[in-house]
């Protein structure tokens, strides 16, 4: 029996529908901005030194960012935050220095002032393609949003990294800097060992960003942060270029295969807010962290070692993300029934799914052949109103329950019923899938 769509409150679907994440190969025309510490660990009372690197090849730098381009620079700790004010240049790098007065983990966050470029409609189209987003060009063209005359593009860059001061201090990795686009690790990067996986949440204006293209990679062994320019040819400065997509909760899971200096990065282009200044906004965001070698003492810790060290807030964020992903899967299933898309509905069912309804049990294939066409017809003909959806997640298994009321007419028969639904979902490599459905209903009294 059909149940209506779940309304997932707080989801940023409307915003995300306007969002295009620039993906694809990193070209020389694309210059990320990274914060790369000279040392990821310093002694208490020591000096934090971080290089601001602007380049298309991590972690090198082609040119030094002018100091007057810094819009905001801060260090965040578990206890608070401190503005940064000591900036200089070292070769092609912006140099940021700070002497902390307390031990603990320090999150350095720098944002650069926005710049604008006025260009023709044709130039803007080329920009989307050159930055690896031909699908964005096609999408905006279908929506009729591409400019037909000159347009103004505004771009800004945001970077974060972590430095450990002393040992055993309070953690700060899950603090947010308030950048329009930023990465927030769900577990402490300081615990990462080669072979682990780091989960990061991508936020857009403080909300999880789903369906975003994210790139990750490690600096190639021996590469220095001052970029050679002999012959004008950029050397290969990193190995491993992972291309990932955030899930419905804005999460990307980065497998860190080897030790070294790593980064995750993304570029987002969206129509600018109404008002003067720009037609399009481009946001660049990066996070730099270190991965240590795995030693004999780490044997058996496995890829989940870093997750065990996550903070209570990070664990709560993970649970919330899983709950949202489960609810969204159920929502997509009902949306598929309501639109008559049997292929999409079946794709959300696990291969060994079972459907319990009207005193019977059907396998996925039996349901496809028998009750699915009727459920689609019912969903499209009769209006249902669903109550709140309750989701419980236990590891890789979750269950979602809800009640509903249904009124209308179906095939000449008046419908006035109360229903209940229970779905059991399992986490698969491709995401959450529905493994069992149980529907029950009863007639409502007039």
Image: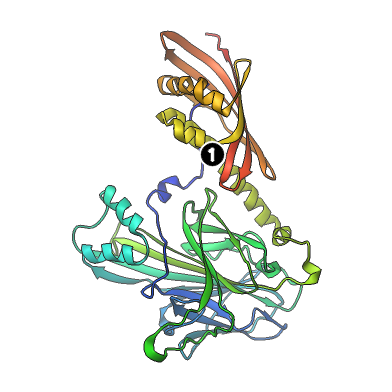
Looking at the rendering, which quadrant does residue 387 occupy? top right
Q: What colour scheme has been applied to the protein in the rendered image?
A: rainbow
As rendered, which of 25 and 146 lies closer to the eye? 25
Q: Position of residue 417 (x, y in %)?
A: 53, 15
Q: Position of residue 380 (x, y in %)?
A: 41, 23
Vertical placement of residue 360 versus 335, above or below = above
The residue under label 1 is 329
Vertical placement of residue 207 versus 223, above or below = above
Question: What is the number of callouts on the image?
Answer: 1
Question: Does dot 1 land on a helix, a strand or a loop?
Answer: helix
Q: Is residue 422 visible?
A: no
Q: Is residue 183 visible?
A: yes
Q: Tell me what residue is drawn at x 52 percent, y 48 percent.
A: 248
Q: Tell me what residue is drawn at x 39 percent, y 48 percent.
A: 17
- Of all residues, the one furthest to the right in this rendering is 297
Q: Tell me what residue is drawn at x 48 percent, y 22 percent.
A: 375
As rendered, which of 23 and 98 lies closer to the eye? 23
| Label 1 crowd bin: few (<14), some (14–19), many (20+), radius 10 Å | many
Judge from the rendering whether residue 148 lies leftward or rightward of residue 94; answer left or right: left
Q: Position of residue 313 (x, y in %)?
A: 67, 56
Q: Position of residue 175 (x, y in %)?
A: 61, 64
Judge from the rendering whether residue 227 lies leftward or rightward of residue 126; answer left or right: right
């Amino acid at each position: 029996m059909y149940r209506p769509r779940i309304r997932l409150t707080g989801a940023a679907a409307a915003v995300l529908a306007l969002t295009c994440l620039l993906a694809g190969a990193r070209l020389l025309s694309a210059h990320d901005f990274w914060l790369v510490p000279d040392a990821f660990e310093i002694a208490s009372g020591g000096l934090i030194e971080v290089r601001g690197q602007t380049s298309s090849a991590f972690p090198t730098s082609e040119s030094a960012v002018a100091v007057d381009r810094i819009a905001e620079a801060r260090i965040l700790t578990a206890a608070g935050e401190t503005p940064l004010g000591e900036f200089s240049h070292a070769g092609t790098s912006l140099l940021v220095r700070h002497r902390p007065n307390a031990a603990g983990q320090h999150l350095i966050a720098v944002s650069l002032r926005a710049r604008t470029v006025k260009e023709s409609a044709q130039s803007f189209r080329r920009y989307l393609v050159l930055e690896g987003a031909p699908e964005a060009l096609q999408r905006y063209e279908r929506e009729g949003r591409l400019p037909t005359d000159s347009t103004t593009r505004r771009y800004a860059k945001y970077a974060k990294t972590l430095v450990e001061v002393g040992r055993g201090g309070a953690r700060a990795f899950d603090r947010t800097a308030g950048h329009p686009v930023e990465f927030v690790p769900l577990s402490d990067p300081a615990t990462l060992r080669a072979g682990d996986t780091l989960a990061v949440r991508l936020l857009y204006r403080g909300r999880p960003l789903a369906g975003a293209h994210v790139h990750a990679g490690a600096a190639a062994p021996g590469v220095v942060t001052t970029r050679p320019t002999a012959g004008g040819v950029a050397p290969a400065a990193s190995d491993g270029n992972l291309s990932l997509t955030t899930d419905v909760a804005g999460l990307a899971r980065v497998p860190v295969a080897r030790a070294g200096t790593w980064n995750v990065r993304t570029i987002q282009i969206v129509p600018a807010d109404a008002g003067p200044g720009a037609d399009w906004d481009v946001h660049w965001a990066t996070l730099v962290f270190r991965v240590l070698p795995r030693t004999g003492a780490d044997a058996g810790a496995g890829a989940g070692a870093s997750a065990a060290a996550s903070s209570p807030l990070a664990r709560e964020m993970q649970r919330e993300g899983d709950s949202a992903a489960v609810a969204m899967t159920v929502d997509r299933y009902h949306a598929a029934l309501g639109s008559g898309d049997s292929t999409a509905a079946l794709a959300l069912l696990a291969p060994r799914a079972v459907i319990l309804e009207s005193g019977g049990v059907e396998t996925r294939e039996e349901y496809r052949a028998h009750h699915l066409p009727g459920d689609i017809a019912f969903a499209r003909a009769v209006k249902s109103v669903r109550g709140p959806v309750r989701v419980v997640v236990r590891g890789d298994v979750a269950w979602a329950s809800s009640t509903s009321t249904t009124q209308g007419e179906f095939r000449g028969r008046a419908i006035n019923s109360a229903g209940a639904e229970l779905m059991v979902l399992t986490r698969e490599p491709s995401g959450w899938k529905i493994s069992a459905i149980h529907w029950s209903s009863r007639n409502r009294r007039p």
